Amino acid sequence: SFQALVGSSKFNFAYYVTGLMLFFGTLFGRLICGFMCPFGFFQDLLYKIPTKKFSTRKFSFLKYLKYLIFIFVVFLFGIFLTDELGGASPYFCQYICPQGILEGGIPLSIANKSIRGALGNLFKLKFAILTLITLLSIFFYRPFCKYLCPLGAFYAITNKFSFYKYHVDDSCISCGKCKRVCKMDVDMSKNQNALECIRCGDCLRACPTSAISTSINKNKVDEGVSYE
C-alpha cells in the first residue's frame, strides 16, 4: 500500500498507511521484525535446521542495501514512476520480494491449473530469489531481514525513538556475552538503539548480571527484581 500510494496526495489512504506504520514503529520499533513478520518466522525455522552456521559480521556493509532499496525502489519509484491517477506499481513486491510468491504465488499455482499455465519469466525470477534466500537462511541468520527488506529499514529507523527500548545499567561488566549471542550482530552494551536490533531477547537471557532490561520491566529491575 505504501509503495502504491506514497507518490500521490490524491489518496487519503496514503496518509493512513504511512501514519499507521509510524504509529507502530513509534510504539515498538523493530520488535515488529522480531515477532510479527511471517517471513522472518520462516527464516527462523530454516535457521533451526541442524547444520554448520556462519557469522554475517564480515558482511555487515551489506546492511545498507535495504536502506537503498527503501529510498529508491519503494519511495522514489513510488513518487516519480506513477500512472495518470497518481498511483505506482509495487515494484519491490513485484520484482524482488520473495514473500508474496511463498505465501501466494506457489499455493495458488498448486491449487489452480489455469494459474499454473499463466506463469512466466517473472514467476521464475521470484522463485529463484526465494530459493536463494531459503538456502542462505539455513546457514546465515535472516539474510533477507538484514540485507533486503525495506520494511525492516523503515522500522530500524524508528528504533531510535520508539517507546519500547532496551536499557543497560551500571551492573554491566562488559563481558561481551550479549555481542556474542546476538545473531543480528549488535553489541547491546555499546548501542541500545542499534538499527539492526530486532528485540529478540537473546542478549537479555545471556547477560550474567541482568544488566539489560526493556522499557516494560526497567522500573521493576531498578527496584531490585531480576528478570530472565
Image (spheres, helix red, strand yellow):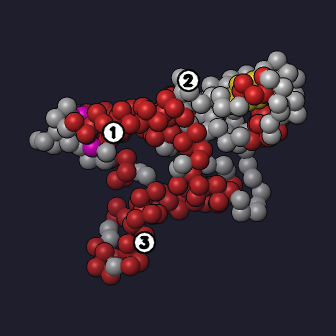
User: Residue at 75% across / 23% down in the picture?
Assistant: 168
**Residue 73 placement (x, y as % from top left):** 36, 39
Per the rendered image, the range of residues in magenta is: 4-8
Q: Is tag 2's residue or tag 3's residue first in the polypeptide sequence? A: 3
Secondary structure at badge 2 equals: loop
Q: Is tag 1's residue or tag 3's residue first in the polypeptide sequence? A: 1
Q: Which residue is mark 1?
A: 17
Residue type at mark 3: give it: Pro
Which quadrant holds residue 166? top right
**Residue 28 placement (x, y as % from top left):** 54, 34
User: Residue at 19% across / 38% down in the picture?
Assistant: 11
Secondary structure at badge 3 equals: helix
Q: Which residue is mark 2?
A: 160
Left/right placement of residue 41 relative to residue 222 reads left
Q: Nearer the viewer, mark 1 or mark 3?
A: 1
**Residue 215 placement (x, y as % from top left):** 65, 28
Residue type at mark 1: give it: Val
User: Residue at 88% across / 34% down in the picture?
Assistant: 208
Query: Which circle marks residue 107 in the picture?
Result: 3
Left/right placement of residue 184 relative to residue 106 reads right
Is residue 64 shown in magenta? no
